[in-house]
Amino acid sequence: MLNDAQVEFFRDNGYLVLDTPVLEADQIEEMKERVLQVTRGEKSGADSVSNLVGDEIEGSDHVVVQIVNIWQADPLFHNLIYQANITEMVSQLMGEDTVRLWHDQIQYKPPRVGAPTDWHQDHPYWPIIQPADLVSCWVALDNASIENGCMNVVPRSHNWGAVPGGLRGNENFQPTFDDESFLPADARLEVVPCEVKSGCCMFHHCLTWHGTYYNRSDIPRRAVALHYMPGYTRYEPDGRGHLVEEYVEVQPGEVLRGRHFPTVRENGQALVPGAVTQSA
């Protein structure tokens, strides 16, 4: 459970790093091995989606491997999305007592060849859901450091709305954009690296500016991102689509719920895998 100061820090800054573990030692080791198995293609379940990100860097062998919706294919990650210590903290940060999973991601930056993930906000890449109130829990399986490509954030950026035209990074991996007119007068573009110990996590708001640099170290950087939405999140398609849209079973304007978007916390109570709820 988070204290009031931690919740206030998150709401002011759009991110929060925890230095206390959310995973047990045996969970960490099992998940680290399972990530390697999954990224080698040793996965079951047709509902998980694999894509390589970063191989668009011309003349480069650098890559990031991401697996989306692994929870649907693997019991280990299925159980993780319901883990009560995580969902309780997400609920606190949202200020909402019903929480559902939007989707998860395995993220793997291999040693020496791990590519950057450019500066971005999450919600503009999720154009089928509103409002922009989602909170992500990023769980480090390996120690995530500056050397192996930990996350970087811009504090308070979640308060500035969606960036017109989107974000990108310059040659020094600083966030850039086309038009500053949307920024408030007191905005400070401060980049903060968020090192996270193995088994610990960080949280960020879906509008917080964030990105990760290369992994040129000899240490892998494996993580699991759990993207959660408050219980009032609606399906609001705008024509741009999303890779999980095929799993949506509600009508536009309705609350997004169903077997592919499980309720993990309801009316302040943690649920368990397979629990049948009124809002499932």
Image (cartoon, rainbow, N blue to C red):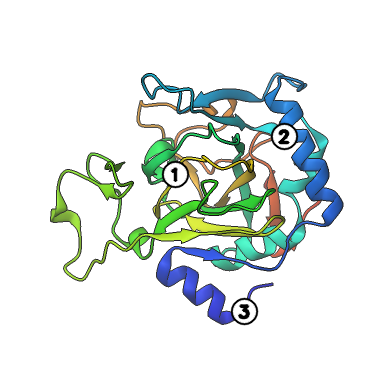
**Image quarter for residue 155?**
bottom left
Asked if the residue at tag 2 contacts the one at tag 3, i.e. Cβ–Cβ closer than 8 Å, the answer is: no
Q: Badge 1: how crowded within 10 Å, few (<14), some, or many (20+)?
A: many
Residue identifier under label 1: 213
Instruction: Please say if 29 is above or below 137.
Output: above
Circle on res. 3? 3
Extreme-front residue of the structure? 218
Asked which secondary structure carries label 1, the reply is: loop
- Residue 228 lies left or right of residue 24; in this view the side is left
Q: Residue at x 59, y 26 (%)?
A: 247
Q: Residue at x 71, y 22 (%)?
A: 40
Asked which secondary structure carries label 3, the reply is: loop
Q: Badge 2: how crowded within 10 Å, few (<14), some, or many (20+)?
A: many
Query: Which residue is at the front of the view, 280 or 196?
Result: 196
**Image quarter for residue 95?**
bottom right
Q: Earlier in the sequence, mark 3 or mark 1?
A: 3
Q: Amino acid at mark 2?
A: Val
Q: Earlier in the sequence, mark 2 or mark 1?
A: 2
- Residue 78 lies left or right of residue 147; in this view the side is right
Residue identifier under label 2: 35
Position of residue 258 measured from the top left corner of the image (x, y, whole percent): 65, 37
Q: Nearer the viewer, mark 3 or mark 2?
A: 2
Q: Amino acid at mark 3?
A: Asn
Instruction: Please say if 277 is above or below 40.
Output: below
| Residue 271 in view, yes or no | yes
Position of residue 179 measured from the top left corner of the image (x, y, whole percent): 14, 47
Position of residue 24 measured from the top left corner of the image (x, y, whole percent): 82, 57
Q: Nearer the viewer, mark 3 or mark 1?
A: 1
Q: Amino acid at mark 1?
A: Tyr
